[in-house]
């Protein structure tokens, strides 16, 4: 009996040991099989973007990459098309870093994006606002004076131009409408004058509005946690295909990781206006709208979630002529869905003067379609008309005349009217005007001829030679 008990106990122990051993071997084999060999060399892996399978993005694989994006090819591709912008006024610039809650200085710093091979550069309006001189430094270190081509304060966008260059590297403008929230983005700029600084983050949100309380604009910003600082203004926000999907414009000083960029699709819409007219020639719908709220939805029994409620219609305006009425809810304009009052304000402003636009509204529990013919916005009056120098005194309040110095003619300032724009921008009696924009002028006739090519309301870049310095002065033509 005792012998049998010992044999049973030994068998049990042996069984336990064998089971444990087999289990150990199985677990070891499983762990070994589940652990892939990882090369220490980082490898570039090409993957297709979600919104455009024809393009290629890059991620890092391997031990060091761990699936994170690889920004190196993007930076190498985009950096040559990013420029450093420095401006000065000679009297303290009240607009310096205004959106960054900064202080006054003798100039400001910013960033720009080359969008044409012959030197057209996109930036923020607040970077060059109030500047008498604009200097652009290319990525290769070359420096050029720049003149203002066009500006739009309501979108905070400006175009400047440098001359004497060709075959410049050009940035690719992408599609900000297809930018997913949470996607990786990088910024290249010159924060605090530190040239070619690269930062990375994600898209935190889109369609951010009402960031300028009490002031109307066409804002609809991309929010990002990518580090943006003073000097980044006007620089690109870039997706993983190396396309510019916004230009960085402001930060929220109340916290970290909250920056904003203007969507590039809005910028692409107004670039032709800025290049041709110097400002945006906006169209007019003739309605006052407001965002939907629970009271409006309950009263109208609106079944949708997004739209713009027409509070009033301008008598005799395009909307009234097309059949729109107060109380309508605009859900679609020119084939584009309307989500807010900001949407309809923007779409109506860029629809085009004289264009016939389909407008879908919700009225009397039904969706109805109307055709509206857009007219010119009242603020456009006189926009493309050339200046009449026969009335209201000389342009800028500055009187010039020809002066011969040997065989060379010069345009010399002989009087600056007190309180005039010319006096405000530092032009003085005895100064010589060498250029109007990129064109040299040698006589008063040539000077006035070049000014005739500008529209009222545009800024004119004058190259002024004073006793102590030669400088560019940006003067509004009014």
Image (cartoon, rainbow, N blue to C red):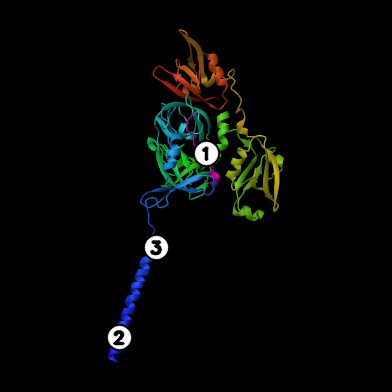
Q: Residue furthest top?
A: 406
Q: Which residue is mark 3?
A: 33
Is residue 28 in sight in this rendering?
yes
Q: Spatial distance from mark 2 to mark 1, Cα to Cα?
A: 83 Å
Quadrant of the rendering where the N terminus is positioned: bottom left
The residues bearing labels 1 and 3 have C-alpha atoms spaced at a distance of 46 Å
Q: Check disc 2 and report its element: helix, strand or loop.
A: helix
Which is nearer the eye, 357 or 398?
357
Q: How many marks?
A: 3
Position in image of residue 279 (x %, y %): 56, 31
In this view of the protein, which residue sits in the foreground, 25 or 115? 25
Observer-side mark, 2 or 1, equals: 2
Horizontally, residue 300 falls left or right of residue 124, namely: right
Answer left or right for 268 relative to 185: right
**Which residues are drawn in magenta?**
167-178
Q: Which residue is mark 1?
A: 173
Q: Dot 1: within a 10 Å radius of its alpha carbon, few (fewer than 14), some, or many (20 or more) residues?
A: some
Mark-to-mark CA distance, 2 and 3: 39 Å
Q: Position of residue 53 (x, y in %)?
A: 54, 47
> Residue 417: horizontal and vertical position, in percent?
50, 19
Identify the residue at the far bottom of this view. 1
Disc 3, SS:
helix
Q: Of label 2 and label 3, which has the lower sequence position?
A: 2
* 10 Å crowding of disc 2: few (<14), some (14-19), many (20+): few
Mark number, residue 7: 2
The tag earlier along the polypeptide, 1 or 3, is 3
Q: Quadrant of the C terminus?
A: top right
- Asked whether 411 or 43 is in front, the reply is 43
Please give the name of the residue rendered at 39% of the width and 32% of the height, measured from the top-left corner. Answer: 105
């Amino acid at each position: 009996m005792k012998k049998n008990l010992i044999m049973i106990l030994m068998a049990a122990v042996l069984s336990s040991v064998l089971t444990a051993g087999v289990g150990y071997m199985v677990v070891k084999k499983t762990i070994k099989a589940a652990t892939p060999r990882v090369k220490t060399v980082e490898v570039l892996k090409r993957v297709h973007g979600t919104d455009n399978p024809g393009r290629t993005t890059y991620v890092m694989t391997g031990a060091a990459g761990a699936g994170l994006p690889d920004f190196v090819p993007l930076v190498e591709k985009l950096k040559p098309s990013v420029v450093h912008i420095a401006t000065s006024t000679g009297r303290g610039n009240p607009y310096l870093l205004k959106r960054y809650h900064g202080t006054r200085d003798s100039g400001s710093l910013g960033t720009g994006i080359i969008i044409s091979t012959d030197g057209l550069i996109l930036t923020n309006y607040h970077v060059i606002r109030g500047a008498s001189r604009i200097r652009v430094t290319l990525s290769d270190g070359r420096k050029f004076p720049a003149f203002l081509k066009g500006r739009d304060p309501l979108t905070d966008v400006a175009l400047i131009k440098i001359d004497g260059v060709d075959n410049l590297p050009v940035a690719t403008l992408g599609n900000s409408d297809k930018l997913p929230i949470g996607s990786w983005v990088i910024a290249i700029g010159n924060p605090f004058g530190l040239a070619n600084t690269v930062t990375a983050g994600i898209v935190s949100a889109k369609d951010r509005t009402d960031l300028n309380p009490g002031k109307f604009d066409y804002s609809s910003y991309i929010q990002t946690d990518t580090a943006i600082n003073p000097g980044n203004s006007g620089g690109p926000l870039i997706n993983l295909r190396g396309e510019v999907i916004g230009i960085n414009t402001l930060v929220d000083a109340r916290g970290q990781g909250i920056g904003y960029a203007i969507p590039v699709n809005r910028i692409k819409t107004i670039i032709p206006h800025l290049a041709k007219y110097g400002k945006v020639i906006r169209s007019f719908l003739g309605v006052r709208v407001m965002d939907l709220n629970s009271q409006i939805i309950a009263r109208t029994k609106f079944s949708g979630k997004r739209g713009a409620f027409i509070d009033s219609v301008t008598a005799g305006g395009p909307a009234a002529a097309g059949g729109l009425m107060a109380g309508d809810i605009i859900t679609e304009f020119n084939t584009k869905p309307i989500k807010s009052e900001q949407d309809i304000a923007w779409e109506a402003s860029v629809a085009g003067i004289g264009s016939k636009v389909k407008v879908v509204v919700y009225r009397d529990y039904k969706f109805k379609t109307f055709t509206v013919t857009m007219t010119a916005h009242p603020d456009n009056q006189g926009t493309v008309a050339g200046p009449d120098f026969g009335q209201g005194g000389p342009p800028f309040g500055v009187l010039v005349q020809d002066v011969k110095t040997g065989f060379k003619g010069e345009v010399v300032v002989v009087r600056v009217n007190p309180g005039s724009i010319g006096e405000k921008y530092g032009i003085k009696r005895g100064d010589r005007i060498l250029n109007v924009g990129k064109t040299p002028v040698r006589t008063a006739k040539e000077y006035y001829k070049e000014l005739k090519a500008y529209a009222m309301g545009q800024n004119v870049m004058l190259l002024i030679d004073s006793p102590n310095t030669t400088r560019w002065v940006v003067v509004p033509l009014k």
